[in-house]
Image (cartoon, rainbow, N blue to C red):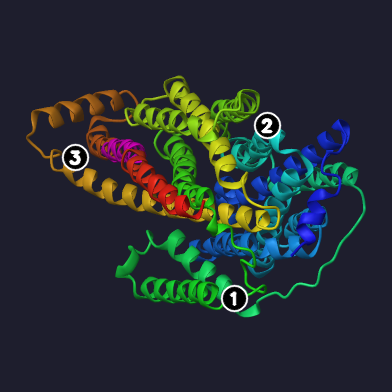
Amino acid sequence: MMHLAETAAVQRHPGTLRASLIATGVVLAAFMDAVASTALSIGRIDMLGDTYATLDELAMIDVVFIAAKLTAFLVAPLLVTAARPTACLRAGVVALLLASATLTLSVDLTWICICRIVQGLAGGTVLVAGQTLLFFRFPHRHQPVVQAVFAVGAVMAPTTVTPALQGWLVDHLTWEWIFLSIIPLGIVSLLLLAADGDRTFWRKTRFPAVEILLLGIGAALLTYVLLQGSRFNWFDDTDITFLAATGVTAAGLLAVWETRFRSEGSLLAISPLGNPDFRFGLLVSFVAGSALSGSAYLIPAFALNVLDFTATGAGVLLLPSGAMLALGLLLSGFVIQRTGIRPITLAPFGILLFAGAMWLLSASTSGSGSPDLTLALLLRGFGLGLLFVALTLVTLQRLAANALPFGIGLFNFGKQVGGLTGTALLQTYIDHQNAHNRTILASHLVNGDPAVDQRLRAAANALANSVDSTAATKTALPLLQRALEKQAATISFDEAFFALVLLFAVAAPCLIVAKQLLGRQAAPQN
């Protein structure tokens, strides 16, 4: 497996201009994946009307995309070992570009699902090959800033910039323009990546078909369960129970196959799990992915469902957080590179800032506006910026060249699974708390209660100017019920924001203990 070491040595230190062009091309490729990944978060309703799909059918478009991307995270390293990272990156960009362009040609659900599968496979390949290329093309001392720049496209864009872009496109054009916007990004990315030259390598590599099949089945079934479980009340539904059991079985068989029958043709042909820093970083990536994706789901959902923001308004709401996230990424990379401090030093500050932001958001009301949320969103963005650069460097920087692509793939896999799990749990928590809070509030909505009677009279008097008194009296009660629903939803979202505070309050001590245990395991080996 000397191929990757040789590839890493080729043009390890390109000139400043070439290096800048390559890095920009990689970031644009990551931005393409960000647009494709978040396309349905804003454009879902418009697509639902044009395709005449049911909610279950539309959910499959997300399921196949995420399952394909999870599969690609673990298969793409094999491609990188067979061909140089640049070739894999270019192939991924071309595939993502073509799939995005052709997806808009038809509203047939089968066709859209096929295109989304290609987008998922291409997106996973782009992230693994792109990050591997940056590690190979830039010296070790420049990696903090380089990885911070890459995270602007891979971490910041899908959680802040792309929702705002897509909200504007949906409000002013159509959902197809979300995918069409990927085309110019892909063309520019390919032009910039031409700076890395045209040399190609190919090493004969055996792709483990059985393991890839188990991975695809497990990813598809468990993704469906995580995305749809809350809607069907999880294991109260026999189909969800069966799919979950089958998915876990496939994942278990894959794990057994990898640990018991390892060979050069395994998915993890060179396993990074022997490195204690990587094992710790992989564990943290799951928690960090939950926090990032969970908060990225909660904030726009709160703005849309409670604060009555438009799609554009909900997207723009995250832009200040995105600006601070980019600042946190770049500043932490610069500080680590210039001072030489250990990257892990910045992680606690990132966690504290993020937890503080969620605590502030947990005090939101149904009358909150953008100014009320700004401080919390700024703290969230800066905290996540500090956390993700530190986490990336701690996890990946000490891996050998041959193990690096496999480490990057597994690291991204952990973040994606953590994000899916965190979002699914928060959706379930909000649904449960919404029903609970509605029941408690409704118990006070009874005739004869002085406060209720006063509120009804006030509502009836306000309506009396536009309708007759009888109609005003009848309309007052539904208005009060709608106010109750909104208040119940507000309380539920506040509790969900506070749940993210508790996540880190519980996870942080556990991660510290895990770090100590992994360090003790590594000591005898040293």
Rendered image quadrant of residue 481: top left
Q: Nearer the viewer, residue 217 or 48?
A: 217
Which residue carries the number 3 mark?
A: 441
Q: Position of residue 254 (x, y in %)?
A: 52, 74
Describe the element under mark 2 as helix, strand or loop. helix
Q: What's the CA distance linking mark 1 and mark 3?
A: 52 Å
Q: What's the CA distance linking mark 3 and mark 2?
A: 51 Å
Taking 78 as reference, is 357 left or right? left
Which residue carries the number 2 mark?
A: 145
Amino acid at dot 3: Leu
Tell whether label 2 touches label 3 (CB within 8 Å): no
Residue 382 is one of the magenta-drawn residues: no
Sequence-wise, the earlier of marks 1 and 3 is 1
**10 Å neighbourhood of mark 1: few (<14), some, or many (≥20)?**
many
Amino acid at dot 1: Glu
Please give the range of residues in magenta: 484-502
Amino acid at dot 2: Val
